[in-house]
Every structure is written in C-alpha cells, then in structure tokens.
Image (tube, rainbow, N blue to C red):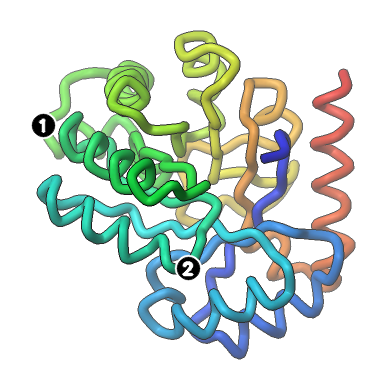
Amino acid sequence: MENHALIVALDVPSSREAAEAVARIGDAVSFYKVGLELFLADGPETLRLLRGEGKRVFLDLKLHDIPRTVERAVGSCLRWGPDLLTVHAQGSSAMVEAAARAVREAGAATRILAVTVLTSLDRSDLDLLGVARPVEEQVLALGRLAVGAGAHGLVCSPREAGALRKALGPDALLVTPGVRPAGGALGDQKRVATPADAIRAGATHLVVGRPVLGAPDPRAAALAIREEMAAAAGA
C-alpha cells in the first residue's frame, strides 16, 4: 500500500451522490473513505460502485463492542474487501486482538486501524469524560496498546502524528483526518493541520472531505492537495 495517499471522505447521504462525487474527482483520487452515514444508508451499493471503478476503500466504521462481536463484525466487513477498516482503541487489547485475528484467519489483505482520540475532541472534552491524561498522552497510550495488540496502524490527529511516529517506528500506518488546506474552514474538527504539516509529522495517509467535495472544482482541489503532499514528502 503506497505511502502518502490522499483519501477523500465520501461524507454524503447516498450512493447516488457518492457516484457523482467520484465522477467529478475522476482520476485525481484512487482512495475513498466510506463512513457510518453512507454505509448505513447505501453501503453495499457504494462499495460495489467504488470497486467497479477500481478504487480502494477505507471502511471507517469505528467498531467498538465486546471482542467476539467485533471479531464477527470484521469477518462480515471482509466480504467487501476494504483496504482499511477501523476499530476503537478504547475497546482495549482483547478487542483489537480479535479484530486482527479475524483478518489473519481469513487471509485477507485488509489493514486494521485503531482510532485513538477523535479529532473533534480536545482537553475540555477529555475532562468531561473523566480522562486525566493530556490529549497527546492519551493518544500515545492508546496507540501503543492498539499496535501492540495487532493493529496495523492508527487513525490520529495530525498534531499527534509526530509523537506517534517516534514512538511506533517507521512501519505503522498513520491515517490523519482533520486535514485542512491553509485558510480552510475547520468545520467540527478541533485538532487540525495542513496537508504539508501532516506529511512532515509522519502521516502516511491523509483523509480530506469538505475541502475537496465542497470545492468548485473537486478534481483540481484534490490535485492541489496531492501536490502539497508530494512536495512535503520530498522536502
């Protein structure tokens, strides 16, 4: 799986709108994220569409349940052949181990990613949840736990990518949402960075939604982000 890939988040409510977005972006993007909203509305149709177009799939369901349930859920997801599939690191070691085992026993190429701390959360949110550690310490603790339990990588804020890369070494996938081109609107994200900053910090995959889908020319917007990523990777 190539490093420094741009993943466009299909944060739309139907497979029809997903198909329209993919058509507008064209050959500028080969990797798409399907999250809960779209998966629950039109999951099978959307996944068939993406596979039919030769696209890679990041299935972002953030599975979080008892280990046996997650193991079976991962097995069900594998029928769609996602390249990446998410679970919550807060499910702890046994749950992440169960997800990794389901992939291993199926002989699948899917990579399990563990979500550490959602990019919509900050210190004040952790206080409300009773988490005493600072955000970065919580991310590092959950990241080490998940990779130690068999996850192939993590979903994390670009602001924590550097610390995670240092802690986990060169092989872990680090997939970062919360990426916004300079001057872009933050939306509901609180811990954000530019594409160049995220790549320089150690991210391998960047997830971008509204800055591409909401652009007057989505293909041009995606190409501009890819150019920024390539320049940062080569610096």
Labels 2 and 1 touching (C-beta < 8 A):
no
Q: Amino acid at mark 2?
A: Trp
Q: Residue shown at 54%/31% (left/top)?
A: 174
Q: Which residue is mark 2?
A: 80
| Residue 97: quadrant of the picture | top left
Left or right: residue 44 versus residue 140 is right
- Taking depth in this image into account, of 118 and 234 the one nearest to the observer is 234
Question: Against 26, is 90 above or below?
Answer: above
Q: Residue shown at 28%/26% (left/top)?
A: 149
Q: Position of residue 189 (x, y in %)?
A: 48, 48
Label 2: few (<14), some (14–19) or many (≥20) C-alpha neighbours in 10 Å: some
Q: Amino acid at mark 1?
A: Gly
Under tag 2, what secondary structure?
Answer: helix
Q: Which residue is mark 1?
A: 130
Q: Position of residue 146 (x, y in %)?
A: 31, 28
| Residue 76: quadrant of the picture | bottom left
Q: Position of residue 26 (x, y in %)?
A: 84, 71
Q: Position of residue 124 (x, y in %)?
A: 26, 34
Under tag 1, what secondary structure?
Answer: loop
Q: Which mark is residue 163?
A: none
User: On the rendered image, what quadrant is the C terminus found in?
Assistant: top right
Label whose residue precedes the other's in the sequence (2 or 1): 2
Label 1: few (<14), some (14–19) or many (≥20) C-alpha neighbours in 10 Å: few
